[in-house]
Image (cartoon, rainbow, N blue to C red):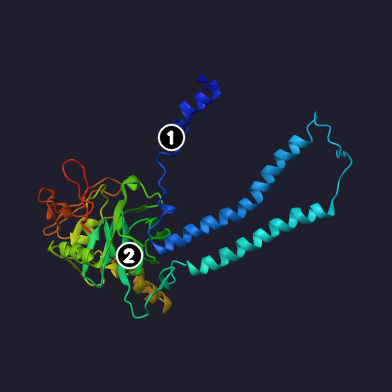
């Protein structure tokens, strides 16, 4: 048998075809393979919409090529008619097909907009299981800071920085705000993004169906530390979540208003921090921009305005209305506004990495050892 040498063009394509895939090397398909039911439904919406649009796109692109080939100059097509200008059947086909697809897209969009409304409590765990009406949802209060994330579990009395955890198959209700400027809370594997805005509260309902560790981040540019404004979301079974909760409570630190004000100062690449206790109504203070002592809460001001104001003397009562970044809490003076600073660690506020040494093999989720390897769970 005589071996045939591949054609030069084929050999070239075989050799350099992998290079054509390099632009896709950094792609993360988590949006198309999520672990939460809400994100799964959003994935299905993308696929359905794309398929409906391709029903028009593919035939049109194919017809363009077919017409170009059939009526080329050398083909001498017998049905060539240079004076042709109208066909009723062709007009019906051209306009009816897109109209039907637009109607279908409109119906899918309308139903999905209501069913996947982030403010609407989810009604199912997955496609086969409904949410038990008696089941208690996990409450998580989220505060976007410069440039880190604070998570408060009001019912559990704990808080964490740059680390989020929840049991698998348990509905989660996020209440979200921002301490400074607008951000966007986004865990692609869990649900869609929703904005975090100062002085306003947004809501997101979601559920995780598979255990694992997933990335969360801000999807809205918010300044110099934006690229490092990331956290880890840990979906665990109930046993793993109880162990994680025990580690958080073992920290002994308390998140009070003074600690919150120090934590609020701009900082980057903040490692996970655990708080075993949280001052009551701290999220309310963050939402209403009155965590600093002496500041008046926005809901109080709005209530006063609704009742006609506080009188002429209130024109001189402006101290509690200033939000210019000047803070003095317990002798702590932050850096000047506009300059980078780091979190001053008060007594009792210890990074999670110091709570669980890597040398003992008990790293906290997201903690890195000296080689840069992150810790994980055994569940």
Q: CA distance from mark 1 to mark 2?
A: 53 Å
Q: Residue at x 47, y 57 (%)?
A: 43
Dot placed on the residue nearer the N-terminal end, 1 or 2? 1
Label tally? 2
The x, y position of residue 99, in whole percent, is: 70, 59
Identify which residue, 133 or 342, lies in the foreground: 133
Residue 205: mark in rendering = none
Instruction: Decide if residue 115 is on the left or right side of residue 244.
Output: right
**Residue 296 seen in render:** no
The quarter holding residue 351 reads: bottom left
Q: Secondary structure at mark 1?
A: helix
Label 2: state its secondary structure.
helix
Residue drawn where x is 53% and y is 26% of the image: 10
- Which class describes the residues within 10 Å of circle 1: few (<14), some (14-19), or many (20+)? few
Which residue is rendered at x = 23% and y = 47% of the image?
Answer: 341
Residue drawn at point x = 75 percent, y = 53 percent: 94
Count neighbours of disc 2 (C-alpha within 10 A) and say few if under 14, some if 14 to 19, many if 20 or more.
Answer: some
Foreground tag (1 vs 2): 1
Residue wearing tag 2: 321
Residue 140 percent location from the top left of the image: 30, 67
Q: Which residue is mark 1?
A: 22
**In this view of the protein, can residue 33 be seen by the observer?**
yes
Residue furthest to the right: 83
Which image quadrant for residue 92? bottom right
Q: Nearer the viewer, residue 365 or 183?
A: 365
């Amino acid at each position: 048998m005589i071996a045939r040498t591949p054609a030069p063009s084929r050999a070239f394509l075989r050799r350099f075809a992998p290079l054509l895939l390099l632009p896709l090397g950094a792609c993360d398909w988590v949006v198309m393979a999520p672990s939460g039911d809400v994100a799964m439904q959003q994935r299905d919406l993308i696929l359905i919409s794309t398929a409906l649009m391709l029903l028009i796109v593919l035939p049109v692109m194919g017809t363009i090529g077919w017409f170009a080939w059939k009526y080329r100059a050398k083909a001498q097509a017998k049905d060539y008619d240079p004076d042709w200008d109208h066909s009723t059947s062709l007009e019906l086909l051209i306009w009816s097909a897109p109209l039907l697809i637009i109607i279908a897209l409109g119906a899918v969009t309308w139903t999905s907009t209501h069913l996947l409304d982030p403010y609407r409590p989810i009604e199912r765990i997955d496609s086969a299981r409904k949410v038990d009406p008696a089941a208690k949802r996990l409450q998580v209060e989220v505060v976007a800071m410069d440039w880190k994330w604070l998570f408060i579990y009001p019912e559990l009395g704990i808080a964490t920085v740059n680390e989020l955890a929840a049991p698998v198959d348990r509905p989660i209700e996020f209440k979200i705000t921002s301490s400074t400027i607008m951000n966007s809370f986004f865990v692609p594997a869990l649900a869609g993004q929703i904005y975090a805005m100062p002085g306003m509260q947004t809501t997101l309902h979601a559920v995780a169906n598979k255990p694992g560790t997933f990335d969360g981040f801000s999807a809205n540019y918010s300044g110099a530390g934006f690229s490092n404004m990331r956290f880890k979301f840990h979906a665990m079974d109930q046993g793993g979540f109880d162990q994680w909760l025990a580690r958080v409570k073992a920290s002994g630190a308390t998140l009070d208003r003074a600690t919150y004000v120090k934590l609020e100062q701009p900082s980057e690449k903040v490692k996970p921090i655990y708080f075993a206790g949280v001052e009551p109504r701290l999220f309310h203070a963050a939402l209403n921009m009155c965590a600093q002592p002496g500041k008046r809460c926005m809901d109080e001001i709005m209530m006063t305005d609704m009742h006609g104001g506080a009188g002429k003397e209130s024109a001189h009562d402006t101290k509690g209305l200033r939000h210019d970044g000047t803070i003095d809490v317990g002798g702590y003076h932050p850096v000047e506004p506009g300059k980078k600073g780091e979190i001053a660690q008060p007594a009792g506020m210890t990074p999670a990495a110091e709570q669980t040494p890597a040398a003992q093999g008990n790293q906290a989720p997201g903690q890195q050892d000296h080689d840069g390897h992150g810790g994980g769970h055994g569940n």
